[in-house]
Image: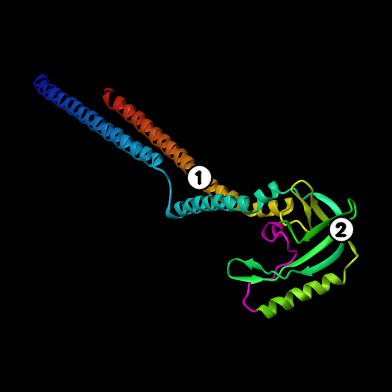
Amino acid sequence: MFLNTASPRRSFTIPININLQGARRRQTRELVHTAAAQEQEWSRGLDVRGGQQRARTQTPVSSVGEDRAILLGFAMMAFSVLMFFVVCITMVKPYVNSNWEERARCVLLQADILEEWVDCRGVSTVPCLRVTVNLSDSNQMASLHFDEESVLLAPECFYVPKCQMDRAELEDEVLKVKSSLDSQKGITSSCIADPTGHPGDVILNRKFTLRIALFTLLWPGLMLGGGVLLVGLVKLTQCLVHLSSEISSQAAEGRLTSRYTQGKLYRLLRRSSTQTPS
């Protein structure tokens, strides 16, 4: 009686254990397939994110303000080059070609107004005031001029009034200058001579000097330096932004890789724990 009742119970327990093991195996296979699919999706997402980040780092970082700043810098440099060209023709070249360097002592002898008036830019004629001096060092007669430019424009005149049509005003202006010079007759003053280029002429002041030439070159130089500095700062800012974006993208990729490896290790441990028999 006891044998008959015990044997059926043992026969029923065997299929139940087999069914449980089969269910565990099916669950393990499903987990493996799910983990593999998640791993593929994770790797695809990682590739896509990495490609997007690489594309972002490869694209140049610029804005409308930076483009305008670069354009302004190049415009400043171009305008400074044009200013250099004008200044070199009008101020630097006359200074380099000028030979008015010898200092002399001049004694004022006479100031006369010429009867024949000189042409003034083709508009009208103006009176010419001629001044004669004596060079104390060489005891020679010479014509006195205000600067080296007046020697080229009016070789015989010390003073020429501005062009205008009123002859009475022109005569009054020249007479005032003549009266002031007559009061200084016999007085020795400093003058500048050019014995090689203009032996019969002397000037009171030099118009083209080293100081004036350097001062006129200062403004184009400052503009050129400002344009170069502006473009350099904008380019440096873009390089720093590009470098920071690359560093941040590399850090993001490192974080994604660490998360991916951690998730993969966790899945492997979980898979090994599910495959061990209970």
Residue carrying label 1: 235
> Toward the viewer: 162 or 155?
155
Left/right placement of residue 216 relative to residue 236 reads right
The residue segment tinted magenta is: 149-166
Viewer-nearest residue: 62 or 40: 62
- Tell me if 163 is positioned left or right of 21 in this view: right
Reply above or below: 71 against 50: below
* In front: label 2 or label 1: 2
What type is the residue that disc 2 sits on? Asn
Q: Quadrant of the N terminus?
A: top left
Task: Name which quarter of the figure residue 158 lies in.
Answer: bottom right
Element under disc 1: helix
Q: Position of residue 219 (x, y in %)?
A: 63, 54
| Mark 2 vs 1, N-terminal side | 2
Residue 122 appears in the figure? yes
Q: Which mark is residue 59?
A: none
- Residue highlighted by disc 2: 134
Instruction: Identify residue type, mark 1.
Output: Lys
Q: Residue at x 70, y 50 (%)?
A: 95
Q: Residue at x 68, y 56 (%)?
A: 152
